[in-house]
Amino acid sequence: MAEKKQSYAEAMKKLEDIVSAVEKDELDIDRLSEKLKEAQKLVSFCKDKLYKTDQEIKRIMEEESD
């Protein structure tokens, strides 16, 4: 079965949950390492999504101004 594509909002929610758990000291050392790796992937996903969206908006604006 194909995995559902993650949205920006879902990724941000997961990041917020991880940050909250870290701030509340809810993670043991093993889970902390695992969650930080997950957070790193989520940050990368979000940055890429923002960059691609920015490029798409610029392209649309250029097309409209022509």
Image (cartoon, rainbow, N blue to C red):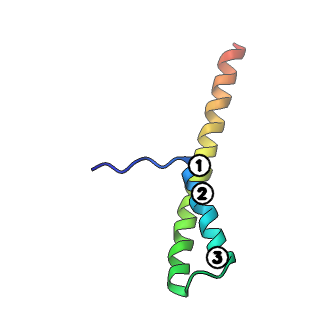
Whether the residues at callouts 1 and 2 have beta carbons within 8 Å, the answer is yes
Residue 2, x across and y down, in percent: 31, 48
Quadrant showing the C terminus? top right
Task: Identify the amino acid type marked 1.
Answer: Ala
| Mark 3 closeness class: few <14, some 14–19, many ≥20 residues within 10 Å | some
| Residue that numbered label 2 is attached to | 13
Cβ atoms at labels 3 and 1 below 8 Å apart: no
- Residue at 57 percent of width and 73 percent of height: 36
Tell which residue pokes out farthest to the top in this image: 66
Across and down, in percent, residue 50 comes to: 63, 45
Instruction: Measure how far apart labels 3 and 2 are at the Cα level.
Output: 14 Å
Which mark is drawn over residue 22? 3
Q: Residues within 10 Å of mark 1 (few under 14, many from 20)?
A: few
Query: Which of the 4 image quadrants contains residue 14?
Result: bottom right
Vertical relation: 28 (above or below) 59: below
Q: Which residue shows up at 60% across the image and 59% down it? A: 43
For residue 9, the mark is 1
**Depth check: 34 or 64 in front?**
34
Q: CA distance from mark 1 to mark 2?
A: 6 Å
What kind of element bears circle 2? Answer: helix
Up/down of 57 relative to 3, above or below: above
Count of numbered circles in the view: 3
Q: In x, y percent, where is residue 52?
A: 59, 40
The image position of residue 31, as x and y in percent, is 51, 80
